[in-house]
């Protein structure tokens, strides 16, 4: 086997920009060069990255046995220690609430600093007459970072002020009237904290997309598509959402079918002055023969039209996509070898890539695997990918390490979340622990 077949090149999955190579300062904790030093502790000068991790890491100190902030360096056994045990002459307690946390504005922790920002944006403190409900202030994740109101984009400020003066109701319908990414992000936070009823985000966006898609279409085009969308796609996707089944894929497929059907019926109406009910087989053949293969997506519409007796005279044949291997066997084996023996990739990437290349597991399934699918018994480890366990004899250490370390990003309300491969979303706020 060629160890480096054509088309295979090494890459790195390490996130973030490369660290500076300037020799201005050297961090005493990580040993890397930096131009930004954040603190000077007994061990020496600390860079911003190490300082930020330190003030957001909590656990039980092995020295004093207390559950508290662990900003100190690892001890001889490799466990992080608290500030007093590490000899750090700094009081990390918040000057307002008294919680031990990193200071983000003077002597205030991120929670209190962010509450001040929200008071400015939503209109006064909760104790003031006419102020917004205090539940709104409890929604954002308050352990991670802080942004001053001056750096908040104008659209976000307008959204928060609208919630504060109640011109935007704190409901799904009220927030739906202000579409945009900031609203979607806020909805996710409110749902995560139980201030809004859970709702499938893809279904909600799909419903709004349908309204915009059908707006302005002639009645001869809009009516059959409205029936198709309501009784086929929406009913199916709503059932999936109610069963907590992923809807991203079905929504994406439905959008393509609806888009292609709209294009066809508009063309049919403008070119031949016919509708879905009077469409003929030559119309179908002409449309498919004069455009890209995506036009075959109209097939589902005419399957439904035949079933509902809207049009029983036409048929669109199923199209099988032409496939070809994207990797040669040598390339596949070389990738597996690089993942199992190399060090250029991050550990979660190594495990996910191995499951893909060895067991043909789709990545959309890999990222949803829970840690309980890994059974790490002494001398033998298995992973449950189907009805029977699989024994990955060649990569037990990687799988075991990934499952035991857990997610690198978990919601603050659930620090023991069992996901092995974290998927970032608005309410996935990192809370590192020792």
Image: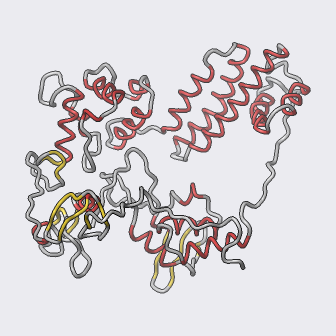
**Tally of marks:** 0
Does 186 sit above or below residue 273? below
Q: Position of residue 142 (x, y in %)?
A: 25, 46
Q: Residue at the far right: name it.
A: 282
Q: Quadrant of the C terminus?
A: bottom left
Judged left or right of residue 350, residue 195 is left
Q: Measuring 39% from the left and 27% from the top, which residue is drawn there?
A: 175
> Of 414 and 142, which appears nearest the observer?
142
Q: In the picture, residue 181 is in which quadrant? A: top left
- Residue 348 in percent (x, y) is at 48, 65
Left or right side of 81 for 420:
right
Horizontally, residue 175 falls left or right of residue 281, namely left
How far across and down, in percent of the image, does residue 35 sit? 28, 58
In this rendering, is residue 32 above or below 157?
below
Comparing 225 with 261, the one in front is: 261
- Extreme front residue here? 23
Q: Residue drawn at (69%, 70%), measured in percent from left and top? A: 331
Please tell me which residue lies in front, 189 or 385.
189
Residue 219 image position (x, y, % from top left): 69, 13
Quarter of image, res 278: top right
Closer-to-camera residue (182/130): 182
Quarter of the image with the N terminus is bottom right
In the displayed structure, does residue 84 sit left or right of residue 395? left
Q: Which scheme is used to colour this image of the protein?
A: secondary structure
**Residue 119 falls in which quadrant of the image?**
top left
Q: In the displayed structure, would residue 323 be above or below residue 43?
A: above
């Amino acid at each position: 086997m060629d160890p480096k077949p054509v088309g295979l090149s090494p890459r790195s999955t390490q996130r973030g920009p490369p660290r500076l190579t300037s020799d201005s300062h050297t961090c005493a904790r990580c040993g890397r060069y930096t131009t930004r030093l954040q603190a000077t502790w007994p061990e020496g000068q600390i860079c911003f990255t190490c300082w930020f991790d330190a003030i957001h890491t909590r656990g039980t100190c092995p020295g004093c046995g207390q559950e508290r902030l662990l900003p100190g360096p690892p001890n001889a056994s490799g466990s992080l220690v608290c500030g007093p045990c590490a000899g750090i002459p700094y009081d990390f307690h918040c000057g307002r609430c008294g919680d031990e946390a990193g200071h983000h504005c003077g002597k205030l922790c991120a929670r209190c600093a962010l509450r001040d920002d929200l008071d400015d944006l939503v209109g006064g403190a909760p104790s003031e007459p006419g102020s917004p409900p205090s539940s709104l202030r409890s929604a954002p994740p308050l352990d991670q970072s802080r942004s001053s109101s001056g750096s908040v984009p104008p659209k976000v400020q307008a959204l928060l002020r609208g919630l504060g003066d109640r011109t935007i109701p704190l409901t799904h319908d009220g927030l739906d009237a202000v579409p945009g990414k900031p609203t979607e992000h806020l909805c996710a936070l409110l749902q995560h904290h139980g201030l809004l009823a859970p709702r499938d985000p893809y279904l909600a966006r799909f419903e709004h997309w349908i309204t915009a898609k059908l707006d302005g279409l002639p009645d001869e085009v809009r009516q059959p598509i409205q029936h198709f969308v309501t009784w086929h796609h929406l009913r199916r996707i709503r059932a999936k959402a109610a069963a907590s089944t992923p809807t991203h894929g079905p929504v994406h497929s439905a959008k393509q079918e609806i888009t292609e059907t709209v294009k066809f019926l508009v063309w049919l109406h403008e070119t031949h002055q016919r509708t879905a009910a009077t469409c003929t087989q030559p119309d179908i053949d002409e449309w498919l023969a004069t455009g890209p293969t995506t036009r075959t997506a109209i097939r589902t519409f005419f399957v439904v039209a035949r079933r509902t007796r809207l049009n029983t005279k036409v048929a669109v044949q199923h199209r099988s996509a032409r496939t070809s291997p994207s990797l040669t066997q040598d390339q596949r084996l070389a990738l597996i070898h690089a993942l199992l023996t190399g060090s250029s990739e991050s550990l979660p990437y190594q495990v996910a890539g191995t499951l893909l290349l060895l067991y043909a597991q789709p990545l959309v399934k890999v990222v949803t695997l829970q840690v309980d699918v890994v059974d790490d018994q002494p001398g033998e480890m298995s992973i449950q990918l189907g009805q029977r366990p699989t024994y990955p004899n060649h990569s037990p250490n990687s799988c075991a390490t990934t499952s035991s370390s857990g997610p690198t990003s978990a919601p603050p309300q659930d620090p023991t979340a069992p996901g092995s491969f974290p998927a970032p979303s608005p309410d996935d706020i990192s809370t590192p622990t020792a």
